[in-house]
Amino acid sequence: MDYAGLSTPTAWVGILAYAFQIYFDFSGYSDMAIGLAKMFGFRFPENFNNPYISLGITDFWRRWHISLGAWMREYLYIPLGGNRVPKSRMYFNLWFVFLASGLWHGASWNFVLWGAYHGIFLVMEKMFLNKVYLKIGKIPTIIFTFIVVVIGWVFFRIEHLSDACLYLKRMFAFDFSNMPTFDPEFVAF
C-alpha cells in the first residue's frame, strides 16, 4: 500500500501485525532449534521469554533474542567498561552497543536508527524512566514499553527512512478516513 493513504487504524494494525509476525517467526525458529537440539541430547537455553509483557526496554532486551543480548553484553558492553565507568560513559556504552546491534541486523540506515532508538530508551531508563515506571505501576509500564517497541519496529521493517517517517506520521495522524468497509454480502456462509 501507499503509506501516504493509510488511515491511522490501518497503520497501527499493520505494524502490530508485523510486531507479532516477527515475534512468532523468531521465537518459533528458536523453539524449533531448541527442540531439535534436545532430540540429539543438546540443551540450548530459551531465547525468547514473553517479551511483549516487559516492564521497560531493559526488561524487553532481557526477554527478546536472549542469546544476541548476551553476546552483545559479553563482547561489546563489558569490554567498553560496562557500568563500571562514570555515568556519562555508561550511557554512551549502552547507546553504542545498541547502535552496533542495529548495524549487526543490516547495513542500512533504518537498522542503525532502530538500534539508536532502543539505545536512547535504555539510557532514558537509567536516567529517569525507571522512577516513572515505579510511580505509574506495572500495567501502564507494560503498555508504554509495548508501544515504544512497536514504534521501533517501524524503523526495523521499512527500508527507507523517508517511508518510515511517513508511516509514523500516519500512525499519529488521527485520520480515520479511507477505512476499510465491511460488506456483509461478501461473507458467504
Image (cartoon, grey):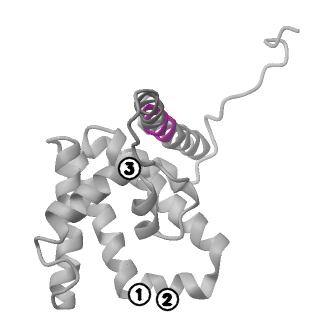
Residue 9 position within the rendered picture, expressed as x and y whole percent measured from the top left: 61, 44
State the SS at label 2.
Answer: helix
State the SS at label 3.
Answer: loop
Residue 30 position within the rendered picture, expressed as x and y whole percent measured from the top left: 42, 37
The amino acid marked with disc number 2 is: Lys
Q: Which of marks 3 and 2 is nearer the N terminus?
A: 3
Residue 168 position within the rendered picture, expressed as x and y whole percent measured from the top left: 42, 51
The amino acid marked with disc number 1 is: Phe
Q: Residues within 10 Å of mark 2 (few under 14, many from 20)?
A: few
Q: Quadrant of residue 83?
A: bottom left
Question: Is residue 21 positioned above or below 124 on the image?
Answer: above
- Say which residue appears at 22% left-offset and 89% top-offset: 87
Whether residue 108 is visible to the viewer of this picture, yes or no, is yes
Side of 121 where 150 appears, left or right:
right
Disc 1: which residue: 128
Whether residue 98 is visible to the viewer of this picture, yes or no, is no
Q: For this rendering, which residue is in front, 188 or 32?
A: 32
Q: How crowded is mark 3: few (under 14 residues within 10 Å), some or many (20 or more)?
A: some
Task: State if disc 2 and disc 1 touch (CB < 8 Å).
Answer: yes
Spot the residue most to the right.
189
Side of 62 where 79 appears, left or right:
left
Disc nearest the viewer among 1 and 3: 3
Q: For this rendering, which residue is in front, 12 or 146?
A: 146
Q: What stretch is highlighted in magenta?
A: 23-29
Magenta region, main secondary structure: helix
Question: Is residue 7 positioned above or below 173 on the image?
Answer: above
Disc 3: which residue: 65
Instruction: Please say whether residue 103 is one of the residues in the magenta stretch.
Output: no
Instruction: Please say whether residue 25 is one of the residues in the magenta stretch.
Output: yes
